Amino acid sequence: MNTPKGKKRFLAIWIATIVLLVVLIVLIGLPHGEHEPIKEVMKDGVLHEMNRMPFLFGLEVNPAVYAAYCVTGILLVAALLIRLLVIPKFRSVPGKFQSALEALVDLFDSMARSNSPHKTGFVSAYIFSAGVYIFFSTVFELFGIQAITTEGRSVALPAPLADINGALGMGILSFCVILGAGFAVNGPKGGLKVLKDFSLPISMSFRLFGALLSGLLVTELVYHYLVTSFVLPVFVAVAFTLLHALIQAYVLTTLVSIFFGEAVEPPKPKEPKAPKEKKEKKERKRRKETPADVPEAS
């Protein structure tokens, strides 16, 4: 395949495939008959009012709740298996999986050391967990796992953080971690310093929610119309999902490590005044208190 003839053949196959897809799209045309309006599709992607699923004690929740439990369970099981079966077999000369795992851990550890040099251990573990959860909870929607709603319809489980409740949960949890670290390290002053940024959990939550929701809505829009729903959604969905997964995991972990470092930074000691300044201050005070000399009578 590395020969010029092989490259030409490969290019010809790709061009023929693209031409065939374009012809099929033109022949198929727009769908006939009734279908769900795009307005309702976009609305349900934000509010999740149409597709509800049964939960405990007769409650009904949106599919993102089930998706969050699935992602959490998968990550916990994977972490347990890695800890019991993989880490004990680590070698001084690492293999591919060990190298990838060590590189991932080193990435978040170096981020914690650079942004929070005073307290690194806890924030390093937290941003590692948060980054992995954000990435896999975003990629989760690509698997298209189906679930049954209360109305008997089959729907694909969405990304947990594409729901405003999941994004708020991640933002508030991160803020609580930063706030707790400020109180634990610097006492009430450290906590009050964090509380000044009261908009931090809202900004982190909506940044995460908005980025993931935009990818979801674009994908739904492409899927809705049959003219663009042939092959194209595969590339759109994968590109948007992977891009948002990487960017949002990096952005949120960076913000958490920066604000964590500011919260646990020890207060700067007051600089002692120089001896010369103290002497001059005492001299000015003495001159001010000493009465003026009275001229002697001749």
Image (cartoon, rainbow, N blue to C red):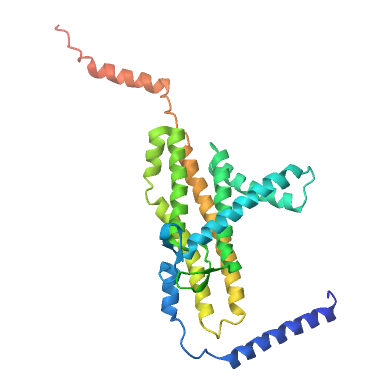
Q: Work out whether 255 lies above or below 184.
A: below
Q: Give the percent coordinates (x, y) of residue 198.
A: 37, 48
* Total residue callouts: 0
Q: Residue at x 64, y 91 (%)?
A: 23
Question: Residue 132 vs residue 291: left or right?
Answer: right
Question: Residue 138 vs residue 62: left or right?
Answer: right
Q: Residue at x 44, y 29 (%)?
A: 269
The quarter of the displayed image where residue 110 is located = top right
> Quick one: which residue is furthest to the left in this view?
297
> Quick one: which residue is furthest to the bottom in this view?
27
Q: Work out whether 137 lies above or below 94.
A: below
Q: Quadrant of the N terminus?
A: bottom right
Q: Give the percent coordinates (x, y) of residue 211.
A: 49, 64
Q: Nearer the viewer, residue 201 or 173?
A: 173
Asked whether residue 183 appears in the rendered view, the answer is yes
The quarter of the displayed image where residue 245 is located = bottom right
Q: Residue at x 75, y 81 (%)?
A: 11
Q: Give the percent coordinates (x, y) of residue 135.
A: 58, 58
Q: Quadrant of the C terminus?
A: top left
Q: Nearer the viewer, residue 295 or 192?
A: 192
Asked whether residue 243 appears in the rendered view, the answer is no
Q: Nearer the viewer, residue 58 or 33?
A: 58
> Quick one: which residue is furthest to the front in this view?
57
Q: Nearer the viewer, residue 117 or 285?
A: 117
Q: Residue at x 55, y 45 (%)?
A: 126
Q: Give the percent coordinates (x, y) of residue 3.
A: 85, 76
Q: Work out whether 102 lies above or below 293.
A: below
